Amino acid sequence: MTARKAGGRLVVVSNRVALPRQGAPGGLASALHAALDEHGGLWFGWSGKVAGETAAELHQQQEGKIDYATIDLSRTDHDDFYTGFANGALWPLLHYRPDVVDYRRSHLAGYLRVNEMFAEKLQQLIKPDDVIWVHDYHLIPLASMLRARGVHNRIGFFLHTPLPAAGLLIALPNHRELLETLASYDLVGVHTRRDLRALEDYFLHEAGAVMRLAGRMRMPNGRQFRAGAFPISIDTRGIADVAAKAASIREITQLQHSLEGRALIIGVDRLDYSKGLPQRFEGYARLLERHPELHQQVTFLQIAPPSRGAVLEYRAIRHELERSAGHINGKYATPDWAPIRYINKSFPHRLLAGYYRSARVGLVTPLRDGMNLVAKEYVACQDPADPGVLVLSRFAGAALELEDALLVNPADTEEVADALALALKMPLAERRRRWEAMMDVLRTNDITLWRRNFLGTLRA
Ligand code: GDG
């Protein structure tokens, strides 16, 4: 790293760009917009469109202090880069699922080809003192490709997924060729200390790096880079306000009315095998099996918008969950009560906030998750006078901060059932104590602190 002052524009690079007027942006998109607004900036990435087989042309637009530049992908590039390598090989590997990894050389070639195209387009757009912030597993080699083109700007990378132990990372063919390119960044950020240890372990033991002071690693070729844990968060105050106001929205009162006094358990997840949904359904079934007194007393609402339907595993899990939900309802439902309400649809954020607040239990049980923002959102949306209980997987990054949740091993369906029973019976005083402790964490570490910490370290 040089001592050069880094005070220019911010350039955000991510696979998808949240363009203005594309509907309500999610928390991450809002945070990045705020960061771009602060210094002026550019957001560059894929448009989300697949356009024939022609070479990608750049679409540019401006909104306030922010420039947006996007490119379309050809069908082949999309299938090899996005569906094939990023979501067919890297995503399962990073989520501890080597059994699901579908590695193909042609997909890796497509991944490198699209990253090279990103580097080529981006190089034309950046100015000498821009600070570049690259996001997520789709774009790991981008900095090394920019460096090869003579780009000397500060470049940071943030990984939104977990990073598994070195012993697992080496299962990926050509892992060094890919992962060593992380050293071309000035700063590599991950969510947790656990991920950071894995990153350091990989570089020290597989890539021949040595540890220098203050989290800096030096590669055998002399290049130095820094790595750090930056746990992402939410707009805690903003979302708490939205939830408080949601109480009067028609959809929310309708949901509450439909419960007829039953306790609501809520789950909200992209339909993804990393989220542990089959095990969660199983855990809920165990609860019903072991606690007949809860029949008619509880309703489990699982919202699971479909994602990545082009990947085989995502279609398989969808079928599995339909079968499981049908089975549980078939076994336990009565003419006036269905134990599970399972919905493959997405909802506007203000409704989600109201649903979270209506739920006595937030059930968040991924098998692995980088952070898991739903867990944090659930906590922030509670009514301070009568807060619900969070049941949270130990294997979500959020578990390292939200220690006052009921932490479970998501694969242990008995433990999930026990935690649900405990949550449903928990006295108000204990619910409030746990909730206050978690809110303290979230009020301090919110999304603004996250981006400022990362960018402050990158610019320092
Ligand atoms: C990745 C990492 C990491 C969900 N359903 C709807 C909806 N959502 C929103 C949630 C939440 C976001 O999507 C999901 O974030 P998560 O963190 O829970 O999970 P991933 O999508 O897997 O995110 C994860 C995250 O990146 C950030 O670094 O925490 O570990 O896997 O905000 O509320 N939003 C709307 N309708 C829905 O139906 N509007």
Image: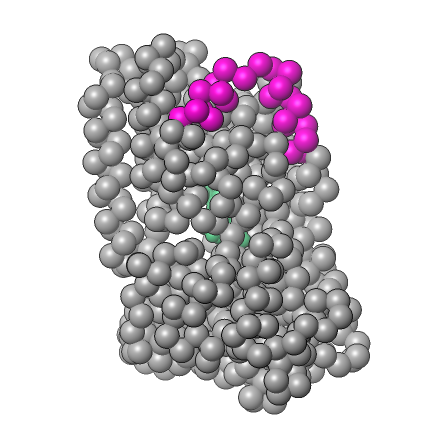
**In the image, residue 362 above or below residue 315:** above
Predominant SS of the magenta segment: helix
Direction from residue 217 to residue 81 in the image, left or right: left
- Whether residue 34 is visible here, answered yes or no, is no
Residue at position x 48%, y 59% in the image: 164
**Residue 251: quarter of image:** top left
- Whether residue 404 is visible here, answered yes or no, is yes
Direction from residue 43 to residue 212 in the image, left or right: right
Instruction: Tell me residue 43's x, y (percent).
Output: 57, 67
Instruction: Tell me residue 51's x, y (percent).
Output: 32, 71
Residue at position x 42%, y 55% in the image: 95
Magenta stretch holds residue 421:
yes
Residue at position x 36%, y 15% in the image: 291
Q: Tell me the quarter of the image containing the C terminus.
A: bottom right
Instruction: Tell me residue 328's x, y (percent).
Output: 25, 26
Residue at position x 34%, y 48% in the image: 273
**Residue 3: quarter of image:** bottom right
Instruction: Tell me residue 332's x, y (percent).
Output: 25, 19
**In the image, residue 136 above or below residue 260:** below
**In the image, residue 342 above or below residue 459:** above
Indicate how the structure is coloured in the image.
one colour
Q: Which residues are magenta?
A: 417-439
**In the image, residue 110 above or below residue 18:** below
Magenta stretch holds residue 437:
yes
Closer to the camera in the image, 140 or 9: 140
